[in-house]
């Protein structure tokens, strides 16, 4: 398995697609792994160099002693440095989306294009994140996994019985509780609302029209403040890259090629 060691932390990544092609980095949501991007990797890896990684505390990446939004963004920069990638496009969903916003503000020289999906400049409230961190530390991941399906997917998609639903919930159930809790604490403090106008790279904002977690209004807030940003709303809930994979891939491919 490919790993890099960075600041005492081991990060797991996967690189697909032709050597020498433009690089696109994919960053997972809270409680998932790089496998959540399987549909995107399959669609893009013929033309792009697809770099996926497990966010710290998720999948096969190690859990740190503490986590902030700057740490999450710094991990991406360290990954690019370790692989000798000067610039890349970045696609992040939910937690990965706010990581992308941080990169757009603080490391824009490393970005060609930025895609932030099902996210907000400030996600939720600090008290809610603190409560969730405490819950998983006390009871493990089972309570969070038991309630995630309705947040992540629409009723219609759940009724379809698509196998990807169970696979994604299994990723959540298998997440290290401490790693998850630390990312909750990072999100509790993450607030980029006053910094979005510093993002100076072409940006696409993707929303889910039925997303109860990060709403279309949250996406509109970002798009209105990032200069020149585009906005696309897809028929999906919170994990639009999974639920509306074909529409997501078409929007992503068109934006990257433009």
Image: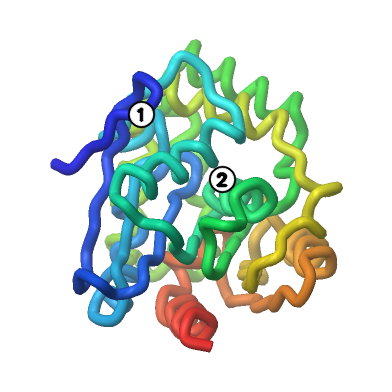
Give the mark, 2 or 1, whose residue is nearer the N terminus: 1
Q: Give above or below for 14 relative to 236.
A: above
Secondary structure of the residue carrying tag 2 is helix
Query: In the rendered view, does 99 fall on the left or right side of 171?
Result: right
Q: Residue at coordinates 77% horizontally, 34% vertically from top-left?
A: 125
Secondary structure found at label 1? strand
Question: Residue 226 lies in what quarter of the image?
Answer: bottom right
Residue neighbourhood size for the residue with mark 2, other residues' Cα within 10 Å, grouped as few (<14), some (14–19), many (≥20):
many
Residue 213 % position (x, y): 67, 51
Residue 158 place in picture, x, y as percent: 44, 62
Q: Which residue is mark 1?
A: 6
Quarter of the image that includes the N terminus? top left
Residue 154 figure quarter: bottom right
Relative to 70, 230 lies left or right: right
| Residue 71 percent coordinates (x, y) | 53, 31
Disc 1 crowd rating (10 Å Cα; few below 14, some 14-19, many 20+) is: few
């Amino acid at each position: 398995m490919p790993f890099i060691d960075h600041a005492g932390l081991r990060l797991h990544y996967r690189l697909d697609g032709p050597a020498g092609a433009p690089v696109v980095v994919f960053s997972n949501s809270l409680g998932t792994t790089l496998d959540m991007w399987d549909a995107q990797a399959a669609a893009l890896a013929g033309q792009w160099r697809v770099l996926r990684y497990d966010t710290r505390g998720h999948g096969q990446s190690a859990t740190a002693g503490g986590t902030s939004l700057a740490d999450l963004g710094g991990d991406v920069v360290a990954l690019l440095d370790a692989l000798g990638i000067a610039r890349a496009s970045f696609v992040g969903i939910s937690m990965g989306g706010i990581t992308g916003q941080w990169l757009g503000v603080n490391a824009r020289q490393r970005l060609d294009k930025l895609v932030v999906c099902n996210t907000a400049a400030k996600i939720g409230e600090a008290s809610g994140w603190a409560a969730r961190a405490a819950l998983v530390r006390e009871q493990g991941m089972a309570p969070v996994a038991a309630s995630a399906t309705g947040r992540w997917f629409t009723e219609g998609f759940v009724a379809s019985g698509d196998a990807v639903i169970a696979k994604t919930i299994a990723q959540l159930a298998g997440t290290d509780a401490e790693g998850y809790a630390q990312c909750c604490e990072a999100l509790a403090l993450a607030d980029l609302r006053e910094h979005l106008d510093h993002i100076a790279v072409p940006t696409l904002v993707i929303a889910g029209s039925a997303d109860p977690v990060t709403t279309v209004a949250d996406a509109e807030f970002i798009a209105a403040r990032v200069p020149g940003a585009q906005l696309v709303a897809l028929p999906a809930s919170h994990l639009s890259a999974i639920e509306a994979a074909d529409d997501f891939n078409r929007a992503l491919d068109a934006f990257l090629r433009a």
